[in-house]
Each structure stands twice: as structure tokens, then as C-alpha cells.
Amino acid sequence: MDRIPILKMGDFLLVTIQVDLYDQLAETLESDLAQMVKKYSSKGVLIDISAVSIIDSFMGRILGNISNMSKIMDAETVVVGMQPAVAITLVELGLPLKGIHCALNVERGMELLRSKVILDTPEDDEDDSNPE
Amino acid sequence: MDRIPILKMGDFLLVTIQVDLYDQLAETLESDLAQMVKKYSSKGVLIDISAVSIIDSFMGRILGNISNMSKIMDAETVVVGMQPAVAITLVELGLPLKGIHCALNVERGMELLRSKVILDTPEDDEDDSNPE
């Protein structure tokens, strides 16, 4: 496999990480995500890691990179589906995943994203910039 | 990896296939899907195969199995994100994926699912069975 598929779901992008991220794959994922955030003016990125059984410092850094990159491009990032064992290991390793929002599952992650972003739909009736 | 994660999104289930399906993995996916359809009373299953570069007769049979199983449990199945090369190969191999609905991407797949299923929300105001 040479790239992880990114699914567009409305204003958000969804990525399911099922395999171990090695250097090239992680790099491709980062650049693909940045490009898709730009292409679709996405407001949020959901990363599902329910199939990931180990998060090491490399993976943590990748998640942080994606989160920071998205933030710069005005998109929020939420990591969903972390397994309990992974959370325990992360804390024991002293990797608190700073700056990364988490949610229990995809649905809650979407709710969190919706609450975080102001979904400014480009409709005329919402145009309140004209002076009265 | 011992199982493919299944994401619940409202009334639908979403599966992203990123790795080659071998016997055990496919079997686990089938049973997991059937259980989740039951557990969440799901109305549809979306299978994203945008990361799949080869669909052979085994994979085609698995997709057919999932579709048939879901149908029996009153859920529709839509396969989304097929790469052009895969479609060409399928036709050349004489594997038309009978009985499987396809859509270009996840969003269109969701639309197709919504049009196929009657989302009977358990609300009282939609009760039109009373005679006038």
C-alpha cells in the first residue's frame, strides 16, 4: 500500500489508519491531507485509530503534525476510536498528545468538530455584512 | 492486523478496505459486519475500496457475501471509490459484481443508500396509518 485513503464527508475529511505508518506513508498522508483540506475547503479532519494497537512517539508526532498543519489551514483535527490500552500506554510513556482533540467514536468526533467549527455556508440569506 | 474497523455513522456503517483480504480477515469482517448491522439496526453498509488496486474473484465473492448477508438483515450495501483500472479489470475478467450497488465516492454512496432505504424514524408525527 502506498497511500491511506482520505474520504470526504461533507465539510470534513475522514481517515482510517489501519496499518503501521512508516516514513513514506506518513509523509504521503500529511501532504494528501493538506492538499484535500485546500481542495475541498474542509473544516475538519477526523482520524480514526480504532485499528491501531500501538502509538509510539513517531505516530504521536505525525498526529501532531497533521493537527498543526490543519490548524494553520483553518481546519480542526479530532482523533477518534483510541483503544483503552493505547491510552494507558500513551500516558505511561509520557506522550499526552498535546494539542490533539480526541473523541470516543466517529459520531462523537463529528459532533465535536461541528461544535468547534463555524460552518459558514456560502448562502446569501446569511450575509450579514451589509450595514443597515 | 486482525480485523478491519467498522465505523458507525448514523444509520449506516462504513468500512474502508486498505489491505489485501485473506481468508481469516474476510471471515472476521463478514461476521463483524453482520453483528454490527444487528446491534445498531443499521440500514446500510458502505464499503470504500479506493485503496484496493486488485479485485479478484475471492474479493468479489466476499463483497457479494456481505451484500447478500446485509440484504437478509434488511440493510443495503454500496461499494464506493472503485478505481478505474479495477473496473476495467473486473469487466475484462468477466466479474460484473452482480447484485452489488456501486457509487463514485462516499458522499454519493450515502445519497444512494438514503434513496434506497426508507429511513423509518420512530416518530409519532410521521404516523399516517390512522384512517381519516
Image (cartoon, coloured by chain):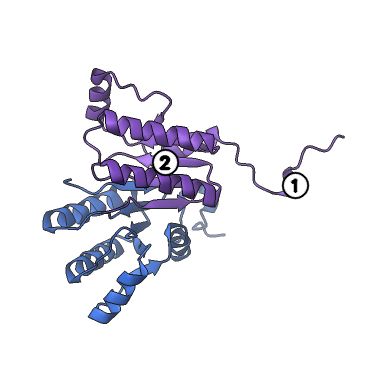
Chain colours: A blue, B purple
Tell me the crowding category of disc 2: few under 14, some 14 to 19, or many 20 or more residues within 10 angstroms, Cα based.
Answer: many
User: Helix or strand or loop: what does disc 1 sit on?
Assistant: helix
Q: Which mark is residue A49?
A: none
At x 32%, y 76%, the residue is A88
Residue B23 visible (yes or no): yes
Give the residue pinned by disc 2: B46
Up-down relation of residue A6 to residue B85 (above or below): below
Q: What residue type is labelled 1?
A: Asp
Is A31 situated left or right of A107 in this image?
left
At x 46%, y 44%, the residue is B34
Is B5 situated left or right of B123 in this image?
left
Q: Where is residue A105 in the image (x, y as percent from the top left)?
A: 43, 61
Up-down relation of residue B87 to residue A93 (above or below): above
Up-down relation of residue B61 to residue B48 (above or below): above
Q: Position of residue A91 (x, y in %)?
A: 29, 79
Frontmost residue, B40 versus A77: B40
Is A30 situated left or right of A112 in this image?
left
Give the residue pinned by disc 1: B125
User: Helix or strand or loop: what does disc 2 sit on?
Assistant: strand
At x 36%, y 47%, the residue is B28
At x 35%, y 43%, the residue is B27
Q: How far apart are the alpha carbons under marks 1 and 2?
A: 30 Å
> Which chain letter matches label 1?
B
Q: Where is residue B33 in the image (x, y as percent from the top left)?
A: 43, 46
